[in-house]
Image (spheres, grey):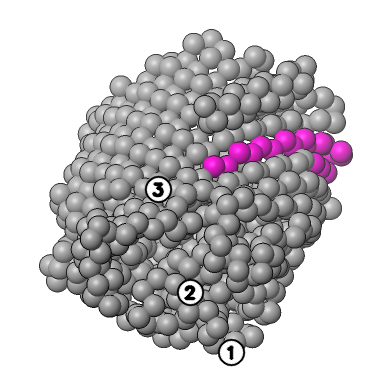
Amino acid sequence: MKRKIIVLAILTLAALLAMITSGLAQTDTIRLEEIVVKSELTPACSNTNITGRILRVENAHDGGAMFVNQIGFGVEKRGNYGMEPVLRGFKYGQLNVLIDGGVQTTNACPNRMDPAISQVAMEEIEKIEVIKGPYTVRYGQNLGGIINIVNRKPDRYGDKKVRAIADAGFQSNGNNFYSNVFVQAIQGKFDLGINGGYKHFGNYKNGEGQEIASSFQRSGYAVKLGYNPGENQRLQLSWRQSKAENILYAGLPMDADLDKSDIIALDYASVKAGKTIHAVKAKVYGSFVDHVMSNTLRPAYMATHSVSPVKAMVMGGRAEVSLQTGTTNMLFVGADFRHLAKEGNRYRTVIKNTCTGQIFDPPKPFTDKTWQDSKQMMAGIFIENKRQLTPSLFWNLGLRTDILHYAIDDPAESFSEVYRNDILPPDRLDVSATSSLSLNLPQNLSLSVAIARSNRAPELSELFINHFNIGMDAYEYLGNPKLKSETNHQADLRIEKQGEKTHLSGDVFVALIHNYISAVVDTTLPRMYLPCQEPKFTKVFTNVDRVLMTGFELGADFMLARPLIFSLGLSYTYGQNLSWDEPLAEIAPFTLVSALSYQHERFDLRLNTRFAAAQNRVATSFDESTTPAFTVVDFYSSYRVFKTFEVNFTVKNLTNATYVEHLSRAYRGMSIESLFYEPGISFNIGLRYIF
């Protein structure tokens, strides 16, 4: 009932927003979902656009896996499902992940089995926009970058009003099956798009034939219903539901029995609303996640039965007006809000005390408060101005203010005791600002420089988690309600040259972060669960005074012949905890990606090679392991047999290399000890039918 009331409230608010702005008129293309990372008025300092063509050819099985071949990215892997992108060393809440230009969701699992990006089916995605760095203030707090997932929508500009696309495929390593169907219908001012899919993945084998625990099943659907009351206006309702089951997380102490998410959003947009008002956009949304994890398939189940049903909810919205204040000036003014809540407990039935060997008959039940019914409320206002100073010089300036409030409604007694009942974080006011200049020089050369001061408020896990193992090491972690917001002072310098047959780019960045949120061992706090095991003490989240991240990205595209293109990309991030005088944890190594591609009207061919250097700069305070260098080669092909029928054939890990990504978690709590190896050679075939 509570969820129904929330959904009704969202729809009512959205309808009111639409009514308020319904008098605005004139014609233009209306984009609800996209962040314009590059516009005529202001070239972006540093961005990436992962197109639908790339997504289809690579055919990644998971949202996080789409970033493996993207320059500047690493991928954190706890299982073969729910992987997360890491950009230049920024991860988790340090990256602002958006769905369709503004919808935000969150993980219910404290171990992040269900990150935001996992709640969208890969087959549903039309493209991905990435802004590298905190160089826009329009979409919420943004410490290190924005990832905007733009999902498929009805194509009103095609020649078919009723259209469908069906995909199905098989991958040999794991006996994996996937399928997806997209249907659109357009009638007058209305349009409807429906996307649904199912996939079943088994355990894969690494290059040496070792079976890796990695299976999962996933199903889901998405509906977009649009109404265009005028040529310049659009109202759109989106509903998305996904369900994953029987997910093995070899890199975590538990597996997921169920992961279910519902996301609903209502958008309104009007463009060319008057002589000064260029566009008005409004969005309200709700996200609801139900997650159940257990240790049923783990050796520890013989002594303790553990199950943890948890929930997360996000309600939010944003409204923005863009004003054409001059022929060379665009002003964006807006506000957004977000209410985030997490609840749920871990229920343990202890059969045997593994420290003493004592058997309990009957077994003893315990309840551990996972989220302590915690909440975060955030409201922000922003102003961003884009100005063309000269025909070749562009200036962007942005300012943002956020007000944050926290609540903890069901605190654990042990948590309150540590902080002497002073467990409510103070309200905070965070201010972010950014400025950038872009200069177009002769001979198709461009130069961009950007600076920013950005903030990231602590996540609920960092504030309120109570003796749970959520890190990369074996420690129990304790939240700290006294944490300060992280503050990033970052600068980017980008050079780009576009030639007739070449495209060259280079980007250097420096980020100095104050109050970086990490964790430190507290020898006055013994571990709460299984106190006989190592490590004996607890880690407490804390602010680190100074952290440095700096690095570069280089890219080059060469047209060897009209359809034959060679691409090369290099990236490296150096992360250092200046206050603790040690390397920063979980930083991807130097990476080189090259591709030789042949694109024809009817077929695509691509040979992709990725080299990752050894990573020996590791954080010993987090028991981080070094990883050796590796090279992996993939072959992708797509052939359009007929206008309506397409065949994809892929060979991943062509040389059957045995390798480990540095950001992958090692096996934990399993019957064997192993690194989390990547799949060995896999032959994949996919079919697409358009009708």
Query: From the viewer's perspective, is the residue at label 3 or at label 1 nearer?
Result: 3
Query: Residue 166, how many percent across, how many down?
Result: 29, 30
Residue 559 at x, y percent in the picture: 43, 58
Q: Give the CA separation, mark 3 to mark 2.
A: 32 Å
User: Dividing the picture into quarters, in which one does residue 350 lie?
Assistant: bottom left
Q: State the separation of the CA atoms marked 2 and 1.
A: 16 Å
- For label 3, the residue is 309
Q: Earlier in the sequence, mark 2 or mark 1?
A: 1
- In the rendered image, which residue does mark 1 sit on? 581
Position above or below: 205 against 228:
below
Name of the residue lying farthest toward the front: 361
Q: Nearest the camera: 45 or 679?
A: 679
Task: Find the magenta span and give its range.
Answer: 313-333
Q: Which is nearer the N-term, disc 3 or disc 1?
A: 3
User: Which is in the foreground here, disc 2 or disc 1?
Assistant: 1
Which residue: 64% across, 78% down? 544
Whether pointer 3 and pointer 2 mark residues with C-beta atoms closer than 8 Å, the reply is no
Query: Main structural element of the magenta stretch: helix, strand or loop?
Result: strand
Q: Residues within 10 Å of mark 3 (few under 14, many from 20)?
A: many
Mark 1 Cα-neighbour bin, 10 Å: few <14, some 14–19, many ≥20: few
Q: Nearer the viewer, residue 103 or 66?
A: 103
Q: Which mark is residue 509?
A: none
